[in-house]
Image (cartoon, rainbow, N blue to C red):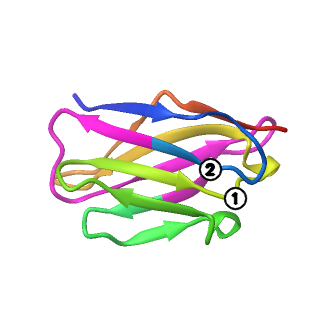
Amino acid sequence: QVHLVESGGGLVQPGGSLRLSCAASGSVSNLWVMGYYRQAPGKQRELVATITSVNTTRYLTAVRGRFTVSRGADGATVALQMSDIKSEDTAVYYCNLVDLSPTRREYWGQGTQVTVSS
């Protein structure tokens, strides 16, 4: 069984920076997609940024240029560096892992709150 362990999050002022991290424990293949989704109150969950095991990245347009997703050197780990944070970035951020081999399996972290407020 794979579990996602998240860290980071909290309260940050507009224009500030924050770093989220997520690590998968358990058996994960060498072919995966990992990243973060977020859900603000009253809104649907949306993809923020993902990275694959071969370093292909994808970003929500609203965060491109402000957020950077990266992977660890070993295993399925991911970090989201958030900069120039805006009030609209306030949401619960969920780590997500899609393991693609031998069959598709998807996992979610418990979520971490990011609140942007002065």
Disc 1: CA contacts within 10 A as few (<14), some (14-19) or many (>=20):
some
> What residue is rendered at 17% in x and 51% in y?
74
Percent position (x, y) of residue 16?
Answer: 69, 50
The picture quadrant where one finds residue 92 is: top right
Is residue 44 part of the magenta span, yes or no? Answer: yes
Identify whether 111 is placed above or below 103: above
Q: Quadrant of the N terminus?
A: top left
Percent position (x, y) of residue 69?
Answer: 45, 60
> What residue is rendered at 51% in x and 54% in y?
81
The picture quadrant where one finds residue 22 is: top left
Q: Nearer the viewer, residue 112 or 41?
A: 112
Identify whether 42 is placed above or below 54: above
Q: Quadrant of the C terminus?
A: top right
Amino acid type at image mark 1: Asp
Percent position (x, y) of residue 116?
Answer: 76, 40
Is residue 24 part of the magenta span, yes or no? Answer: yes
Amino acid type at image mark 2: Ser
Q: How many marks?
A: 2
Q: Which residues are magenta?
A: 21-49
> What residue is rendered at 50% in x and 62% in y?
68
Return the disc, 1 or 2, that comes first in the chain's sequence: 2
What residue sits right under mark 2 in the picture?
17
For the residue labelled by badge 2, is the local secondary structure a helix, a strand or a loop? loop
> What residue is rendered at 25% in x and 48% in y?
76
What residue sits right under mark 1 in the picture?
84
Percent position (x, y) of residue 3?
Answer: 30, 29
